[in-house]
Amino acid sequence: MHTFGITDHYFVVVEQPLTVSVPSMIKNQVTNSPLIESLRWYKDEQTVIYLIRRKDGKIHKTFVAEAFFYLHIINQYEEENNIILDICTYRDPSMLDCMYAESLKNIQKNPDYAKMFRGRPLRFVLPFADPTNNHSVDENSGLLCSTQTIIYHLNNKQIFVKPELLCDLGCETPKLHYEKHMGRPYRYFYAISSDLIKVDTVNKTWKTWNEKNIFPSEPIFVPAPEPKSEDDGVILSSLVWGKGLENQVGVIILDAITWKELARAEFTTPSAVPKCLHGWFTPKIF
């Protein structure tokens, strides 16, 4: 598990069917092989989502979904009698192959590298209250919530959730206005594939920014001093170039509302610059 969710009253833990083989891990220690070779994906198993009460650490409710792989939860929050859970998901963990050193060395020469990130942001609606008789359904029918998520109450007492697609683009390293909206209702998040992406989770629309031969990093949202809306601020992202420009690097600033470029800085370095994923912004200089 790379991330977990937290709301006012619950921890949200997502157990994907990706495990570590202990015998393989011991063998890899002897042969000095990477840990990734010890991972085992069970495609026929379900992903399990746990709601854990913060007040006593006990499991409140358990849900199941089709098998998916994930690294990052976008956000989660309580709404009426539900937990809304948004996750960047993949059908399997094959995208981890992108992280091998050989793949990273060729990232700027491989036109299909971005296509390896085929994940999609999905929304799961998890009812933390027990369903009434009016809402109880069997495995052949579903309950449609306020979003397009469908909840099935199976005969074996399991609750199966079928998610809603938030954006038909590959999205990773999602960011939002954390200080005000982490664990609370929100509308916008920002992500990357080979583009910089802004997703409106209410209208299910998105905006992208890209330039040929440029690879942006994780978008960082910086709110305006006195923001008038959730997306009133700027997006910061570092840039690297490919195809002969591996010593060039930059920082771009986008208007988070209009998604238009406001400014950028570019400079060259003594050696090639690798693509980065994560970053942060601080208003203080230490």
Image (cartoon, grey):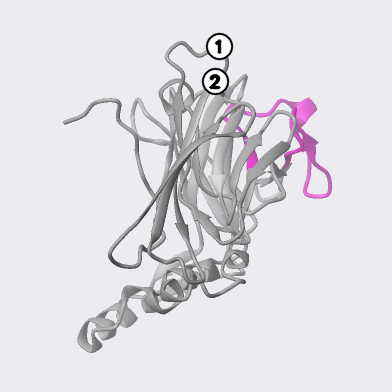
Residue 58's x, y, as percent?
A: 38, 35
> Looking at the rendering, in which quadrant would you find the N terminus?
bottom left
Front-most of residues 14 and 272: 272
> Circle 1 sits on which residue?
228
Asked whether 145 falls inside the magenta stretch, the response is yes
Left or right of residue 66, residue 4 in this image: left
Of helix, strand and loop, which one carries label 2?
A: loop
The percent coordinates of residue 249 (x first, y second) are 40, 54
Q: Residue 268, which numbered label?
A: none
Q: Are marks 1 and 2 in contact (CB under 8 Å)?
A: yes
Q: Residues within 10 Å of mark 1 (few under 14, many from 20)?
A: few
Which span of residues is magenta-colored?
123-151
Write down the residue under mark 2. Answer: 232
Q: Classify 23 as above or below 214.
A: below
Decide if residue 9 is on the left or right side of residue 167.
left
The amino acid on which the numbered mark 2 sits, given as a three-letter code, is: Asp
* Amino acid type for the residue under numbered disc 1: Lys
Res. 1 visible in picture: no
Residue drawn at point x = 50 percent, y = 14 percent: 227
In the image, residue 283 above or below residue 89: above
Tell me where residue 268 sits by quadrant.
Answer: bottom left
Q: Residue at x 62, y 34 (%)?
A: 259
The crowd level at tag 2 (other Cα within 10 Å; few <14, some 14-19, many 20+) is: some
